[in-house]
Amino acid sequence: MIYEALAMICAELRAYVKAFDATANVDLGSICAPGATTDALLLSLVNVEEESALKNSSPYVRNATGSFDLVNPPVFLNLFVLIGTSFTDNSTYATALKRLAWAVQCFQRKKELSVANTPTDSLPDEALRLRLSLDLYSLSFEKINQLWGTLGGKQVPFVVYKVRVVEEQAESQFGSGAAITTIEGRTEIINPTLN
């Protein structure tokens, strides 16, 4: 679901930015990759973390027959998405800043994305069950330096969003069994002997 989440964010941002600038290019990709698209807004995944608050879920899932299947619980992820603006020279720098501002406006206006409120023409079918929440994520100057050093490129205007919560679930089942409907047992009364 990581790709589907990024595709949903990209579709929403593309629809918003095209209202201001029909020639704007919004796409998934690395802003630092050789031959990266110039004069564009590019979305890059820069980090993934597990949402530990949702880690303790039951491995037993009721199926259609009323019995239970044993499956590993899904992993819930937070994605850190960098939205960067590329530009060719100083004359297009102002345009890059405007596009970055539109990206911030887009997710300030709509902090939660789902299939009900996002353009779905280019989304994969798996994205239909996604519900994403986006929060602007601020980095210190030290972290910014480390991020761009790791990416291997020169810094361009950018923002980072923390996208919560993406669910990843493998299609596997470890076993199944009937539900427990009765408990049987026997009790025995023991009389202690008196001394």
Image (cartoon, rainbow, N blue to C red):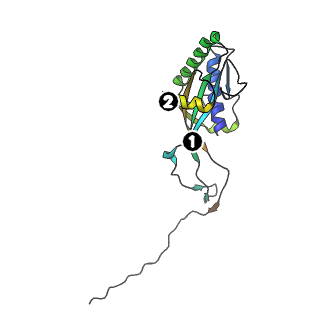
- Indicate the quadrant containing the C terminus: top left, top right, bottom left or bottom right: bottom left
Q: Amino acid at mark 1?
A: Leu
Q: Quadrant of residue 79?
A: top right
Where does label 1 land, which residue? 77
- Indicate the quadrant containing the N terminus: top left, top right, bottom left or bottom right: top right
Secondary structure state at the residue bearing disc 1: strand
Q: Amino acid at mark 2?
A: Glu
Q: CA distance from mark 2 to mark 1?
A: 25 Å
Where does label 2 land, which residue? 142
Say whether residue 180 is left or right of residue 23. left
Q: Nearer the viewer, residue 130 or 41?
A: 41
Question: Contact, CB < 8 Å: mark 2 with mark 1?
Answer: no
Q: Position of residue 138 (x, y in %)?
A: 49, 28
Looking at the rendered structure, the number of numbered marks drawn on it comes to 2
**Pointer 2 or 1: first along the chain:** 1
Please, which residue is most extreme toward the left here? Answer: 195
Q: Which mark is residue 173?
A: none
Please, which residue is most extreme toward the right here? Answer: 35
Against 156, residue 189 (above or below) is below
Q: Quadrant of residue 69?
A: bottom right
Q: Nearer the viewer, residue 38 or 178?
A: 38
Q: Position of residue 63 (x, y in %)?
A: 62, 55
Secondary structure state at the residue bearing disc 2: helix
